[in-house]
Amino acid sequence: GNSVTQMEGPVTLSEEAFLTINCTYTATGYPSLFWYVQYPGEGLQLLLKATKADDKGSNKGFEATYRKETTSFHLEKGSVQVSDSAVYFCALTSLRGYSTLTFGKGTMLLVSP
Amino acid sequence: DTEVTQTPKHLVMGMTNKKSLKCEQHMGHRAMYWYKQKAKKPPELMFVYSYEKLSINESVPSRFSPECPNSSLLNLHLHALQPEDSALYLCASSQAGPTGEKLFFGSGTQLSVL
């Protein structure tokens, strides 16, 4: 079956530091890949997505590239802000349609001033 | 309007109570979802409705009863819950199409079962 593995958190950074959150996946076929973000007390928001190999998703300074050869979709940002503190979930679409998602366990990011 | 609205935001109930969670969207989405999220865990899929018909039930106990009265509304009826059912319940919607469609999530209902 499909699965997503994310790096353990929390990731603690100072403002303006470079961010990488690793995500690897196991899937049959060609799933779409997503990063969702969850701020405290809120639901999940789509941060970015990629639907095929070598696609790069980007939004709000965050980027991730769909790497089929390494089955990875690592999230990066060049300069984090305090407001980026949240939990980040890597996810992929399942084989069952209706956009059902398989999530990784989530990585908490804490950015200090 | 790109919002999914969930009510109530917080709910405390006893194990003998009956309550309902409500979810509403006006984006014309024809697929709606219930997810359950325990603290510090990822969301877990419970139910999927497509065109107002239940399409996926992830072996959820019968004390959770979903309902989709129309294409904009999704309810989750709760009865005889257990303390371990305490969690954040998230509603989501998407276009009912091939996989890869974006899910829009509500802010959730934080449920505590005493």
Image (cartoon, rainbow, N blue to C red):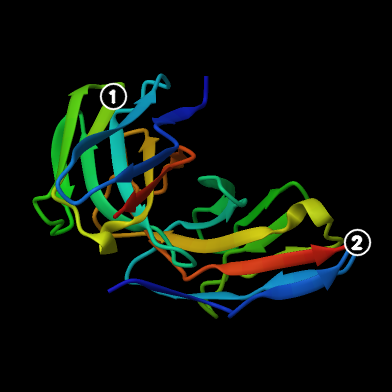
Residue picked out by circle 2:
A113
Residue B35 position in % (x across, y down): 33, 50
The answer to whether residue A92 shows anywhere in this view is: yes
Report, in whole angstroms, how far the alpha carbon at label 2 lies from the one at label 1.
42 Å
Which is more toward the observer, A78 or A84? Answer: A84
Compared across the picture, whether A82 is left or right of B96 comes to right
- Above or below for A58 versus A72: above
SS label for mark 1: strand
| Amino acid type for the residue under numbered disc 2 | Pro
Q: Residue at x 55, y 45 (%)?
A: A42
> Residue at image x 30%, y 36%?
B32
Q: Position of residue A22 (x, y in %)?
A: 62, 75
Q: State the residue position of label 1.
A: B73
SS under mark 2: loop
Chain under callout 1: B
Above or below — where is A60 with respect to A28?
above
For label 2, the crowd category at 10 Å Cα-Cα, with few meaning under 14, some 14 to 19 and many 20 or more, is few
Q: Quadrant of the C terminus of chain B?
A: bottom left
Closer mark to the observer between disc 2 and disc 1:
2
Q: Nearer the viewer, residue B46 or B71?
A: B46
Tell me the quarter of the picture where residue B5 sits.
Answer: top left
Towards the viewer: B101 or A28: B101
* Residue at image location 46% in from the left, 42% down from the top: B102
